[in-house]
Amino acid sequence: MRRRKRNIFQKTAAILVSGLLCVSAAFGGVEPITVEAEEVVGAGNEADIADTVSGNEPGSPKAELSGEQADRQAEEIALADNTVSGNEAAARELAENSAGDTAVSGVGWELDTDGTLTINSDEGMRDWKDNGWSIHKEKVRNVIIKDSVGTIVHWAFQDCVNMISVVISDGVREIGSAAFSGCDSLLTVTMPDSIVFLYGNVFDSCDSLESVTLSAGLESISGRVFGGCINLKQVTIPEGIKEIGDNAFSQCSGLETIILPKSLEKIGAMAFYDCVKLKKVIMLSDPPGIENLTFGNCGFVTDGTAPGIVVSEDKAEEYRQKWAGKYDQYIRAHSHSWETAWTSNPFHHWHECTAECTIINIADKDGYAIHTEDAGTITKQPTQTESGIKSYRCGVCGYEMRTETIPAVGTAEGNGSGDRDDKGEGGETPKNENAGSNSGENGIANNIPAEKNTIEDITGNNVAVHYDSSGSDISNAKTQPVKDREPKTGDSTRTELYATLAMVMGLTYLLLYFTDRRHGMTEETKKELVSKLIGWARQGGYCRRLAAIAAIFVLLAYYHGIGKKIALEWKEVYGE
C-alpha cells in the first residue's frame, strides 16, 4: 500500500513539473531543458509512469513527456525541445502534423475528422483560401457551403483531389474562376437557383464529374466552365441561359446528348469542340448565333451517319439559312409522332413524342389536360371480416386518383372494422346463446319471433334485426342501432369533474346561507374574501384554480342573492 501511494505521488509530481515547464516556456522564453527521471520521481520507479503527456494545440509550443520501458526495471522521462517559435512556416507544419485525426478550424470554417469541410461565412471562405487550403486541401472529401456565404472565391477548392461531393446552399450568388478545377473525384454538382454568375474554368478538368444541374438564375455559361470533364454525361441547362461561352464544354468526351433551351441566343467558338460521342443536339430555340468550330469534331460531324442537330419542323429552313456554311448540312427537322399510350402525373395526362422531341414543356404536348374522376369501381369486395376497396380513376387516361375503404359487411353500421378496440366496443354482433341447433353460421337463430325484433349488441345497445320472413339464412341480416338508450360517452372524466364542482358549489352555498344568515355579507367582506381566494389560486396549479373559480362564483351568487340583503336588514333592525 505504501509503495502504491508513493507511485501515485511520483506520477502526480511528474505531471506537475512538466506543466510548470510548459508554462515557463510559453511566458518566459525558457531555454530547452532536459530532465532525468530520477530528478522528478526518484530512482526505483518501475513502469508506473505515463508514457506521454501532451496538450498542445496546432501552432502552440510543443511539449512531450516520453519514456522507454525495459524489463520493468527502469524508466526514463525526457522533456526536450520546449521552445516557442514565431516562424509562420513552422506553425503551419505543426498544424499539418497534428491534424491527422483531429478536427481543424479557422475563422468561419471547420474541417472535421471525416473530411467534411463546412464554410459558414464570406470571411470563412476567404480564411479557408488564404490559410487552410494549402495545408488541408487533400483531406477534404465533402464540402458544405452555408447560405450565409455569398461568393465562392477564385480557386477556393482547386485541386482538392479527394473531394467527392459539394453542397451549395441557396444564397450563394457567384462562383469564382477555377473554384473547383482539378477536383478529380467530384461526381455530381447541383447548383441552387440563387447563383447568377459563373466565372471561367469553374469545373475545368474535373475528370470524374458525371452529372451537372445548372442554376435557373444563370444567364450565361462562361468560357471553359466544364472544359475537359471527360466523363460528363448529363447536363441540365435551364431556361433563361442566353449565351454559352467559348470552350464551355470542349473535350467533354462522355457527352452523348444535350438539350439547349429556348432562351439561347449565342454559342461561342469551340463550345462543344472535341465532344467525340456527342451524336444529338436538340435545339428548342430560334436559330442562335454560332462561331467557328462550335461543334468541331463532335460525334455527329465525324460519324456522318445521321444529321445530329435536331430542330422543330417549322424552323428547319430558318436554321439552314442562318447557319449556311456552318453545320447547315447537319440539321434534321423533327416531325412529332405522338404515342397512343397516355403518360400521367398526379394532376395531368398527355401523349409523349419520341425521345428527341423538341417540346420539353408538357403543357405543349399532345392531349395535355387535367384528370377527370370517374364514378369509382370496387376493386376488392368486402367480406364478413375484411374491408373492401373502391378505386377512382381518371376517365380519360385511367390514372388512379384515389381509393376508398368499404367497411366489412359483418360489422355494425358506423363501425368500419370487425376488430374490437381496447374498451370492448365495436366488433362483430355476438352469437345468440339460446339459438340451439337451429343457429346459423353466425350463431343467430334462423327463426326469430316477430315480437323479438331487437337484440343487444356487445356494447350493451339494442339493435334492430331485419330478417327474411321466409326463413332464409339470417347471416345476411343487417343490424341498425335502436335509439332507445342513452348514448355512451368515451371519456367520463370531464363529466364527473363538472358534477363534483356543481355539488361543492351547492353545498358551499347552503353552508353560507345557514351559518351567516343573521349577519349577511357586506361589500367589504366580499372584496376581502375574493382577494384571498385569488391569492390562494395563484399559489397552486390547475385544480386549485378551478376550485377557486367555483368558490368565487358561489360567493358572488350568495352575496348578490342573499348576503347583501340580509346585511342591510340586520343593520336596519340592530344598527351597526
Image: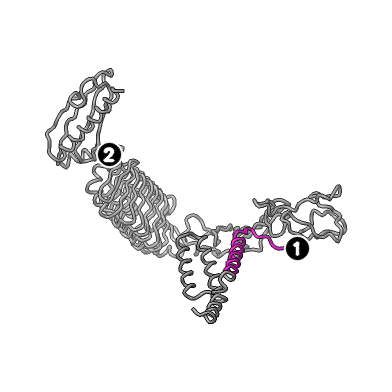
What secondary structure is marked by label 1?
Answer: loop
Q: Position of residue 319 (x, y in %)?
A: 39, 62
Residue at numbered disc 2: 99
The quarter of the picture where residue 89 lies is top left
Residue at the image position 29 percent from the left and 37 percent from the top: 100
For the N terminus, the image quarter is top left
Span highlighted in magenta in the image: 483-511
Residue at the image position 16 percent from the left and 39 percent from the top: 26
Q: Is residue 387 visible?
A: no
Whether 405 is drawn above or below 514: the answer is above
Residue at the image position 49 percent from the left and 54 percent from the top: 355
Q: Position of residue 354 (x, y in %)?
A: 51, 56
Alpha carbons under labels 1 and 2: distance apart = 80 Å
Residue at numbered disc 1: 482
Identify the image's colour scheme: rainbow, by chain, secondary structure or one colour: one colour
Q: How many marks?
A: 2
- Of pointers 1 and 2, the one earlier in the residue sequence: 2
